[in-house]
Image (spheres, rainbow, N blue to C red):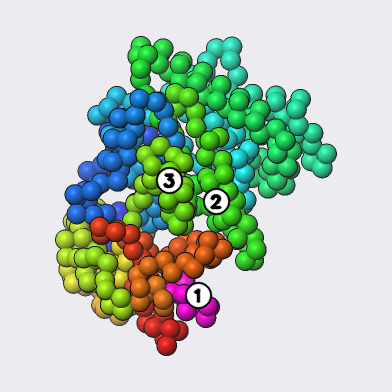
Amino acid sequence: MSELRNRAKQFYNQLDFDRPIAFGDEPLVQNGLSDTLYVKSIHGTGERDSVQELANQIDFADSAGAYLFTGNRGTGKTTELLRLGEILRSNYGCEVFYADMSDYLNMSQRIEISDFLISILGAFSEKVGERFGEDPGKPGFFERVWSFLQTEVSFTEIKLPAGPVELKAALHENPTFRFALQRGMRGNVEQLVKQSREFALEAVLRIRKLRGDDNRKVVLIVDSVERLRGVGDVSDVHEVFKSAETLFAAHADKLRFTGLSVVYTVPPYLQALAGALGASYAGGRIYALPSVHIYQGKPEPGQRPLPYADGLNKLVTIIDKRYPHWHDFFSRGQLLRLAQNSGGDLRDFFRMLRLAVTRSPEAGLPLSDMILSDAEDAVRGDMLPIAKDDGAWLARVTDSHSAELDSLGGLPDFARLQQGKYLLHYRNGEDWYDVHPLLREEIKLLGA
């Protein structure tokens, strides 16, 4: 194998956007990347840090609360949540657990309070067991729910899974069972809430006893809920988005537990409900992680955002930390070009770099601008074609840099545009939006 191919493979694998950066001597996730790769303040100027603000809220509060955190895939959200966990653990002495909900629920299906609570407390039960061992003589949460379902819920069209392990698997893999569970539990939600709260308090008291600290705060970080999105036709997509809105807007009281603080990730489009929704949760707001701070600020209407050199340079620093010899492949100008055309989306930035690097064994070094254009076209192609009504909406956003959401009835479509990265969220003193830079010319034509 040629030396160039070996170097390209090494560079390619250092651009891993699926593994988050983990922090501290006791990381919350296995196989995370080293925290030496972390670059500070990529989402702002450093004057305001949403993660530190959230950590302060949890530390200052005398009682446990439920908190909301959001950010699109590609913003580095999971890495920032793991940083939150390390701040809480090392600076404020909290006992912190992390659960990836995509391991427990299929995020492309409608969600209800019943399956959400079972999954959250089931995950918490497992994480506590992994760290402290099983509580002798006391069943875990999946086992308790399975026993409850046996006696209190009637399943006529489908059988109850054979045991707690099978119940967990069915929630994730069997949509027919999951929908049957949702139907069967609608008359038993209050009983499930009661059991959930009893288990949470029981687990918190056990943790405090084992740690020898009666006042230790216990925090559960619930990740990946922002991935909720429907697949298939428009009605299916809208149904899933609507179920997420209902879950967090109508059931806020059911998502709080005595002694256990919970940080829930929520879909970014729920920020449109920020006033009403934030007031129902501890902290009084939705803590949002915007796209990387690559623009100076919200432009005047009709103007394009101006590049922010410090933010773009931090994206170069990220690559420098991962592969110091990147300049053999790209010029600095080329790296800045891809950084700017990513719109501050880390996933798209890494993806374009990877696409270009894979061409190097045949194309040679340094890589040409044409290869960069091909990589940009590949990422752009995932977002094309754009429907005329979507194009008209995006054209209005391009002009005003606001959400242009005429009514909450348009929330599912707004969610779809955010999930597809047609719309990117920024924060420079205020929240604002812009279309993905790779789509600007297409949107300009559609708007005209």
Q: Which residue is mark 2?
A: 245
Disc 1/disc 3 C-alpha distance (Å) = 28 Å
The answer to whether 58 is drawn above or below residue 244 in the figure is above
Please tell me which residue is depicted at 29% across the width and 59% down the height of the picture: 430
Q: Nearer the viewer, residue 207 or 238?
A: 238
If you read the primary sequence from the N terminus, does the residue marked by circle 1 or circle 3 appear first?
3
Front of the two marks 1 and 3: 3
For the N terminus, the image quarter is bottom left
The answer to whether 149 is drawn above or below residue 115 in the figure is above
Q: Nearer the viewer, residue 214 or 248?
A: 248
Please tell me which residue is depicted at 66% across the width and 40% down the height of the picture: 170
SS label for mark 1: helix
Magenta portion: prevailing SS class: helix
Instruction: Tell me where the magenta segment starts and ends, as one range.
Output: 380-394
Q: Which residue is mark 3?
A: 278
Please tell me which residue is depicted at 63% across the width and 57% down the height of the picture: 239
Q: Which residue is mark 1?
A: 390
SS label for mark 3: helix
Q: Quadrant of residue 230?
A: bottom right
In this rendering, position of residue 138 left or right of residue 56: right
The answer to whether 329 is drawn above or below residue 48 in the figure is below
Marks 2 and 3 close (CB-CB < 8 Å): no
Q: Amino acid at mark 1?
A: Asp
* Residue 234 position in % (x across, y down): 62, 66
Q: Amino acid at mark 2?
A: Glu
Is residue 215 covered in magenta? Answer: no
